[in-house]
Image: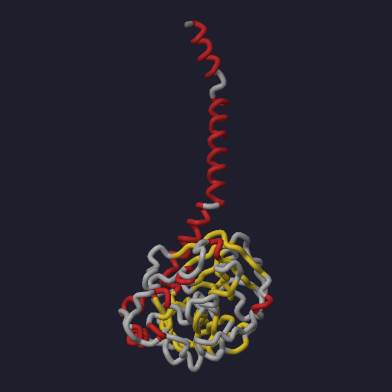
Amino acid sequence: MCCLYENCSNRALLKNKRICFIVKVSNAATIVKIVNGEDADIEEFPWQVSVQTNDYGYWERHCGGAIIAENWILTAAHCTIFTEPRTKDGFRVLAGSSLYSQLNVIRYVKDIYVHENFNKRMLIGNDIMLIELKKPLIFGAKINKISLDGDISKNRTGELCKVSGWGNINGTKDKLNLLDRLQEASVQIINPDSCVKVYKVGYTWLANTKVCVQGEEKSSCGGDSGGGLICRDEDDNTEKLVGLVSLGLGCDAKVPSIYSKVSAYLDWITTTMNRKGKNGKNNTKDKKNSRDNKNRKDNKNRKDNPNRKDKKNKKNKNQ
């Protein structure tokens, strides 16, 4: 989660984005933290993954993410800001256990796709990113995908939802008490006006592309960035990925947080997944099919005109 103001209080907007995160930039700059959460089982959140970075020669926990397909993870774009290198080689994904120390399903990254209009300076606009895995995940009880919320017009104000992640439960940003056990917290989607007042942003922009969320003594914090906001859809009684942890003013659960609205980016998500797939392995197959079709056509033409070469030779001979 990103903090817009110095010391995470509602003051003048910082010009230096290097201190944007709630916790100071360090080896543990974006540790996953659920404030005042409860122990959770991965079977309840099988789409939950830990996104690690390798900034200092070793892998460490950095952001959360949600599985949306065997080869695809959805997370926050600002998770790339403090990673070196800021390329696919700087990331890997872990899944498959309630205990962080036992996340032994590891996938390396084929490529990352940051939204083309992500605001790198402010870290707030179009804060969404896709991670394509080199090797597909094998789905089961502990690893599975979450359905995407596709109804952008639906008013979810008042709905109770859940967030999850590994990390801090005491709510302090200065001391990082890392937990091994997956945590969950119940939060509520509230009226966008509440976030407009706190963050001093435009109502239309927030209502169209963000979700305003608050919990009772519970919240997401720090490196919960990219983790999913999961709500149960009453229409079909299925859980949907409604938001991605994006912005906050600290680890105080009494202050609302801002999540990227997944339904606002559904077209971008599906288009990116389809286009990148076609430009990759499938494109090679298409080229091969094109060559095969050309060869078949040439062979057919030769069969249809068996005397074409003979007529040409005869003509040359007569000359």
Examine the image and state in which quarter residue 3 appears: bottom left
Name the colouring of the figure: secondary structure
Which of 123 and 287 lies nearest the eye of the viewer? 123
- Residue at the far top: name it: 318
Q: Judge left or right: residue 116 versus residue 140.
A: left
Examine the image and state in which quarter residue 268 appears: bottom left
Report whether residue 184 is seen: no
Q: Residue 285, position in %: x, y?
A: 57, 47
Q: Residue 263, position in %: x, y?
A: 44, 72
Identify the residue shown where x is 42% and y is 77%: 20
Q: Residue 161, position in %: x, y?
A: 50, 85
Which of 135 and 99 lies nearest the eye of the viewer? 99
Q: How many marks?
A: 0
Which of 74 and 9 lies nearest the eye of the viewer? 9
Q: Residue 43, position in %: x, y?
A: 65, 79
Identify the residue shown where x is 54% and y is 61%: 88
